[in-house]
Amino acid sequence: MQVPLKWLQEYVDIEGPREEMYERITLAGLEVVGIEDIGARWDRDKILVGEVKEIRPHPNADRLTVAVIDYGADEPLAVVTGAPNLKPGDSGVKVAFATEGAMLIDGYATERQYVKLRPSNIRGVASTGMVCSEKELGISGEHEGIMILPADAPVGVPLRDYLGDVVLELDLTNDMAYCTNMAGVGREVAALLGVDYHEPPTQVLAEGEKIAGQVLVEIADPQLCKRYSAALIKGVSIGESPFWMQQRLVRSGVRPINVIVDITNYVMLELGQPLHAFDYHKLRPKPGGGPPAIIVRRALPGEKMPTLDGVERDLTEEMLLITDGGGPVAIAGVMGGLESEVADDTRDILLESANFDNISIRKTSQTLKLSSEAAVRFGRGIDPELTTVALGRACELMRTLAGGEVAQGFEDVYPGYAPLRTLQFKPTEVERLAGIRLSTEEIIDLLKRLGFECDQSMEQDGPLSVTIPSHRLDVSVPADLVEEVARMYGYGRIPVTLMEDELPPQRVNWELEIEERVRDVLAGCGLNEIINYPLTNLESIAKLSPGAEPPDTNAYIRIANPLTNEREYMRQTLMNMMLETVWANLRFAYRVALFEIGRVYLPVSGENLPEEPRRLCISMTGPRAESSWLGGDADLIGFFDLKGVVETLLERLNVEDASFEPTQHPTFHPGRVARLLAGDVELGLLGELHPTVRDAFDLPASPVCLLELDMEALTEAAHEVEFMKPISRYPAVRQDLALVVDEGIPGAKAEEAIRSAGGKLLVDILLFDVYKGEQVPEGKKSLAYSLTYQSLEGTLTDKQVAKLQSRILKKLKKQIGADLRA
């Protein structure tokens, strides 16, 4: 919300440094997020209020004139201007006048830039000043003509003093709807500063006929319309609103239109009550005759209406309308209709001031994608007592500014009337909830500043009976009153206190710690985390098991009211949604490496709620390395790339006794799938996707690696403490060992036998070659290892290493029938 300070000062006297006031109201909830100082760059000696004494034709140019300006100096100045709103013969017009040396905005530049005004000679006529447009002064983007000031503007006064202002931009939370108007902000500022608040004038001089019998108002849906008030003003003249009103509207972010519309907007900004003006003679009576009628009802099926922006709107039965005897004339609380709008020939006005249900207005505005200042205010909630107050203010302005005659009384239908609410409030709650020790008298004083009425109990330390002002719709429980006391007292003044008790012992959440460690490790391996919906569909799940029976619907938990068929069942695996995400990402990238940690939902017989174990899912596909001008590895990601990521994860989690065993699974490619074990506990599956499954998910014809692990089992297998090994200061000895083994024996078994025989002196083992070919017998394969020996006690001799090698070979021969390759 934009708050011009000159306007605000009509309701509250602001004393002391403004910066302190800005900080005070910000800490109380009226956050100042921007300050615009209008006129801050207007030189007090060079930009002044001037008066046109004479306009003469330019001797050498048809479109230019010479203006003689009195600006308070001893002699007037003659300047050349091309302004279309100054014509030869004009005089007495008040203008904004700049003299030589003034800094003005270049009116012809596309971006805002300041230029220094210098003397010039325009078509043979000297010009040492300038009459200014609003754009050149930085007030608006208007540059068609010069800015015309009111006739009572004092000549020679610095324009900064006459027209300058400071505009605050406030960021208000939804519960501060009572501050979305100038009077509300003024009331709040006065309370915070402890000064008097001046109520805006709301008295109206009504000299016309009584309104009774001239209009009929009915509320067909009192649930959505608590109150509808109407006033009648006859004989208005449509024209421009006065300069002061236009300036206030512009500085508040509202574009002036005409005097009637501007008054409705002005009162809305001042009091917070949206108004709408109808052309009285365009309103139709009910069938059968009578005065023009206003009926507040919901829209009928298929009903449409054109709004003020010229768009025909399709209405639903949930939307509230303002109708006359013939049909809709406005969408309640959002926008008026085109057929009843005020035009230049309008003479009689029916002025609406109503109170609508805030939820209904928000839904209507969102459904129609139609936002307005009125809809924003109605959507936050408005005091129903404001309707007649705002009518009085607007009617008096229309009488004085538009020459209208106000009918006596208002047509006021108020089915939603409710008395003021009261709360029983214990003063001790302030100290209990806010930590502020205040006397009952101090609490009453702070609440009274905000308009709360407090009746004190006769009992010692008894509760207060607090009457809530009608505009404070946000106050409903005693804790709200504590908040108001704390705001008025000042959050910055609340004393800092320490806990009287010791802090409870800090316990590690091991599951969460492991989960975060998994995320860190996988991100370090180059994978990106995703978060999928926990809802899926059976068709997607069935793609994981091609040729199998469709999933049993009874085995899954179904959502009672799914938003879409694609999100109907709670998932029992992360794999299908992961593959769908891989497909979506491959539309924009050629390499994908993703992981997700999420819960699955497994029904439990006889229980209402399912088990919700966590799972880890990884998928990788595409080139092994990113593209580079250096070239690089162009091979595709495969099973062993995924296995390497898993081995890194297990190492970082200190998982011991981990192993991979071949297995079969319908989702994975035969021969390229393995179980991951930690001891005898299965952690999950990993492998390359079966081509049929890959095609079912519309993935490209390249290897797609997939893994799903049980996070609960992984957490159990992980160790918090990592045991460090001493570093030997003696040199290491490296020996290669080439073995011939049966083709079906996995390398892991050979490695296990080597480690077992090598003992503590074998510190590292690396498989660097696997060979099948002519030099190896049929049914056999060659495994070549690099073994590293090192002792903590001394340098190993050749004899010691040879003895170790011999022991390893005997172990290999005995366990897996391995022979030394010649």
Image (cartoon, grey):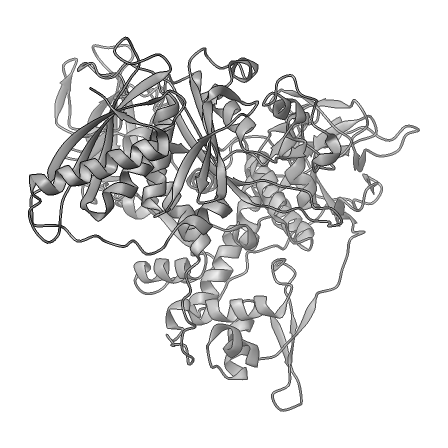
Which of the 4 image quadrants contains residue 403? top right
Q: Is residue 478 visible?
A: yes
> In the depicted view, which residue is nearer to us: 614 or 60?
614
Residue 233: x, y in percent? 69, 40
Residue 232: x, y in percent? 72, 41
> In the depicted view, which residue is nearer to us: 511 or 670?
670
Residue 511: x, y in percent? 46, 52
159 on left or right of 591: left
> In the depicted view, which residue is nearer to us: 763 or 413?
763
Residue 29: x, y in percent? 46, 58
Q: Is residue 152 visible?
A: no
Note whether 317 is above or below 313 in the view shown: below
Which of the 4 image quadrants contains residue 101? top left
What residue is at 50 percent from the left and 64 percent from the top? 197
Q: Residue furthest right?
A: 288
What residue is at 40 percent from the left and 52 percent from the top? 513
Note whether 702 is above or below 751 in the view shown: above
Note whether 589 is above or below 422 in the view shown: above
Note whether 565 is above or below 196 in the view shown: above
Q: Residue furthest bottom?
A: 460
Q: How many marks?
A: 0
> In the depicted view, which residue is nearer to us: 17 or 700?
700
Q: Quadrant of the C terminus?
A: top left
What residue is at 67 percent from the left and 33 percent from the top? 569
155 on left or right of 365: left
